[in-house]
Amino acid sequence: MTVEEHFAALREIERRDHEEFVAMIQGWLSEAVAAGDEVSARRHREHLTRLEAIPKPWEPQQRAA
């Protein structure tokens, strides 16, 4: 396995783990909304916003202009 293949495999594992974590938080959000728990729903929405904002190594990096 080349170094590039190794890094690609690690990025794939990281991506999959992140997507599973986001799905778990989205599930908690859905449960909170269904239960009418606005405080928890807000907290989960904010968490999802923070997760969306973090840089993801598996996505191409945009260069500053």
Image: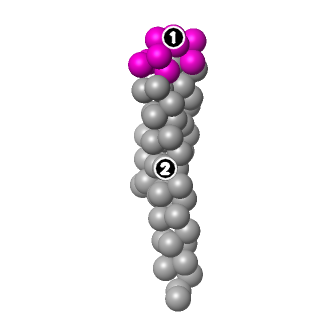
Q: Which residue is outermost to the bottom?
A: 1
Magenta segment boundaries in residue numbering? 32-40
The x and y percentages for residue 61 are: 46, 51
Using the image, determine if residue 17 lies above or below residue 9.
Answer: above
**Magenta segment includes 38:** yes
Q: How is the image coloured?
A: one colour
The x and y percentages for residue 35 are: 47, 16
Numbered disc 2: secondary structure: helix
Numbered disc 1: secondary structure: helix
Residue 12 visible within the image: yes
Residue at the image point whose x is 53% and y is 55% from the top: 17
**Magenta segment includes 41:** no
Residue identified by numbered label 2: 20
Q: Residues within 10 Å of mark 1 (few under 14, many from 20)?
A: few
- The disc at residue 38 is 1
What secondary structure predominates along the stretch shown in magenta? helix
Q: Residues within 10 Å of mark 2 (few under 14, many from 20)?
A: few
Residue 54 quadrant = top right
Q: CA distance from mark 2 to mark 1?
A: 23 Å
Q: Name which residue type carries label 1.
A: Glu
Q: Earlier in the sequence, mark 2 or mark 1?
A: 2
Residue at the image point whose x is 56% and y is 29% from the top: 47
